[in-house]
């Protein structure tokens, strides 16, 4: 260095010191890997989650905990067989700091495996797979949405409370459908009802006719369904066209009518569902969120937008606690675990297993909204079965 001017030499030495201390890495943008469906029956859900996440970041001036964010994206196609490879594109190739995803439970379970093995921070903004905050729970795995058991259990409690005795269920044969039905059955049978038959078809098939014929033949007191996205809109239409909407009471997990009402047409009107969000919750927080979302995207927010928004809030709470220093991972995760999230759904905290403890609302679809009817179950916590943490 003796031939360099003194100022240049000092600058070089300072840069070298910064590089070895790693301090430079804490001012670079934090890398966020968004793994969501951009194609298939859940494409619109992925889009709403991304919009919600980015809206919260924008409202904070584009930074969380003083850190700018850089986004990396993969379309997971809601395809479990490609999930490990897709997650590794973000973790190994792009070297993201945080994984955010996804919608489909089977894909999210694979993401959780990758996150555990690589110790990448994972925030699940939808997929309800019970195991993510159950047997697969980990200090670096968080969920901003729900467990499949939660809305299902709420529907079971409501159906039993209305005095129905014999129920049939219908869903897709994969983790989300099975767990949602399990939650319904638990709530319904605890209240004195009996599930007489579970009907299923492969995800994401929409050939409902044979199953609807079976419902018509069995004439249960009530039908419970879990479907979502494009498939749910088709289900509502077919259920109506088969004449069942008029003859057999129905209740569903709220995903059946969230983001699907336009496509469902008249079949989507007046449908009762249970979920941790209702469009018209009349609080300053929800009203401000819906206004901000509508201004930014010229579209109405739904539950998926809320969950994406809250995923960003959770990360923001962690980053704020460590002043943006992502290397302080233990402190960051501890702050996320005990944060009170000021969600449009209402304030929530996380269970010991990192799943939201939240009210489950009974809603009724009207126009393009899912309107609040009542609180089906107050402050419902997923049991978090099998979590060792
Ligand atoms: C899931 O696979 O866990 C899932 C998918 C779509 C929803 C809800 C849950 O709307």
Image: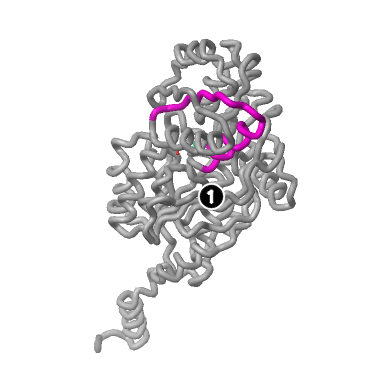
Figure coloring: one colour
Relative to 75, is 194 above or below? above
Does the image show residue 81?
yes
Measured as percent of width and height from the top left, residue 289 is found at: 66, 48
Does any atom of ligand 1 lie closer than 8 Å to the CB of label 1? no
Residue at the far front in the pictured view: 192
Residue receiving disc 1: 53
* Rendering coords of residue 115 (x, y %): 34, 54
Q: Is residue 367 magenta?
A: no
Task: Check disc 1: other Cα within 10 Å, few if <14, some if 14-19, many if 20+.
Answer: many
**Is 151 included in the stretch rendered in magenta?**
yes
Identify the residue at the far left of this view: 2
The residue positioned 32% from the left and 86% from the top of the image is 5
**Left or right of residue 35: residue 303:** right
Res. 51 image quadrant: top right
Q: In the displayed structure, would residue 160 be above or below residue 57? A: above
- Foreground residue among 39 and 197: 197
Residue at 53 percent of width and 68 percent of height: 320
Q: Answer with left or right where residue 269 lies relative to residue 8.
A: right
Number of marks present in the image shown: 1
Residue 97 visible in the picture:
no
Q: Is residue 151 left or right of residue 293?
A: left
At 45% from the left edge and 25% from the top edge, which residue is drawn?
A: 198
Residue range in magenta is 150-173
Q: Quadrant of the N terminus?
A: bottom left
Q: Looking at the picture, how far across and down is residue 371, in whole percent?
A: 70, 35
Tell me residue 210's x, y (percent): 45, 12
The C terminus lies in quadrant = bottom left
Q: Secondary structure at mark 1?
A: helix
């Amino acid at each position: 260095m003796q031939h360099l001017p003194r100022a240049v030499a000092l600058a070089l030495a300072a840069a070298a010191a910064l590089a070895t201390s790693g301090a430079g890495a804490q001012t670079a943008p934090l890398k966020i890997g968004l793994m969501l469906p951009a194609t298939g029956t859940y494409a619109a859900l992925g889009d709403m989650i991304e919009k919600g996440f980015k809206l919260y970041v924008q409202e904070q001036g584009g930074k969380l905990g003083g850190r700018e964010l850089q986004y990396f994206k993969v379309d997971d196609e809601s395809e479990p067989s490609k999930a490990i490879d897709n997650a590794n594109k973000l973790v190994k190739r792009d070297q993201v700091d945080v994984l955010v995803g996804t919608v489909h439970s089977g894909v999210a379970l694979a993401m959780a495996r990758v996150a555990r093995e690589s110790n990448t921070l994972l925030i699940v903004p939808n997929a309800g797979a019970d195991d993510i905050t159950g047997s697969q729970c980990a200090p670096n795995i968080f969920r901003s949405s729900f467990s499949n058991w939660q809305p299902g259990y709420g529907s079971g409690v409501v159906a039993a409370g209305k005095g129905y005795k014999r129920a049939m269920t219908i869903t897709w044969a994969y983790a989300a459908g099975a767990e949602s039905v399990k939650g319904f059955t638990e709530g319904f049978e605890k209240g004195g009802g009996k599930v007489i038959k579970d009907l299923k078809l492969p995800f994401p098939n929409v050939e409902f006719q044979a199953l609807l014929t079976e419902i018509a033949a069995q004439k249960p007191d009530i039908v419970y369904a879990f479907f979502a996205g494009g498939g749910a809109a088709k289900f509502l239409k077919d259920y109506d066209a088969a004449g069942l909407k008029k003859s057999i009471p129905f209740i569903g997990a709220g995903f059946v009518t969230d983001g699907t009402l336009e496509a469902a047409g008249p079949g989507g009107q007046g449908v009762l569902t249970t979920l941790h969000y209702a469009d018209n919750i009349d609080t300053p927080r929800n009203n401000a969120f819906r206004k901000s979302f509508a201004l930014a995207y010229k579209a109405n927010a739904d539950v998926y937008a809320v969950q994406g928004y809250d995923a960003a809030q959770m990360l923001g709470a962690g980053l704020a606690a460590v002043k943006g220093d992502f290397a302080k991972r233990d402190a960051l995760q501890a702050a996320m675990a005990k944060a009170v999230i000021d969600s449009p759904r209402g304030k929530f905290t996380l269970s010991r297993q990192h799943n939201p403890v939240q009210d489950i609302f009974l809603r009724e679809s009207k126009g393009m909204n899912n309107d609040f009817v009542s609180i089906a179950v107050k402050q419902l916590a997923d049991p978090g079965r099998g979590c060792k943490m």
